[in-house]
Image: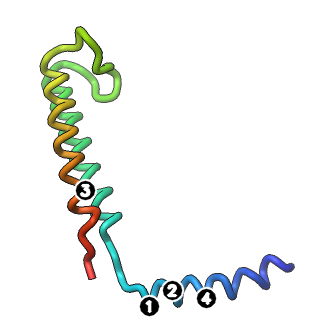
């Protein structure tokens, strides 16, 4: 029963803190951006005849897959701007 009595004040403090802080959707935007990057990488791998997530980027990997990995890295690094941008 002690947990229930502590849960309500904690929940109220968290709600008040969130209300005073304002909205920040940077984390959501970052996640959406990463999802888009991974979708494009999966399409790139498919065009190269491979399945995304099953090929190690090691010596001897096909050049098309290495190109997909390079593009994925560039896309993911551009997502940082989306993650750091406040929405409100």
Residue plotted at (35% across, 64% down): 27
**Would you place residue 65 above or below residue 42 in this image?**
above
Q: Name the residue under label 2.
A: 17
Horizontal arrangement in the rendering, residue 18 relative to residue 75 (left or right):
right
- Mark 3 and mark 1: Cα distance apart in space: 25 Å
Q: Name the residue under label 1.
A: 20
Secondary element type, mark 3: helix
Horizontal arrangement in the rendering, residue 62 relative to residue 20 (left or right):
left
- Mark 1 and mark 2: Cα distance apart in space: 5 Å
Q: Mark 3 points at which residue?
A: 80
Tell me residue 64's x, y (percent). Answer: 13, 21
| Image disc number at residue 12 | 4
Residue plotted at (18% across, 45% down): 75
Q: How crowded is mark 4: few (under 14 residues within 10 Å), some or many (20 or more)?
A: few
Residue plotted at (18% across, 52% down): 78
- Mark 2 and mark 4: Cα distance apart in space: 8 Å
Secondary element type, mark 4: helix
């Amino acid at each position: 029963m002690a947990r229930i009595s502590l849960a309500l004040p904690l929940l109220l403090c968290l709600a008040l803190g969130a209300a005073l802080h304002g909205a920040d959707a940077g984390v959501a935007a970052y996640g959406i951006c990463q999802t888009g990057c991974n979708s494009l990488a999966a399409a790139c791998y498919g065009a190269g005849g491979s399945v995304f997530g099953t090929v190690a980027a090691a010596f001897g990997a096909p050049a098309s897959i290495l190109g997909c990995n390079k593009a994925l890295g560039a896309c993911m690094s551009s997502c940082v701007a989306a993650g750091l941008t406040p929405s409100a």
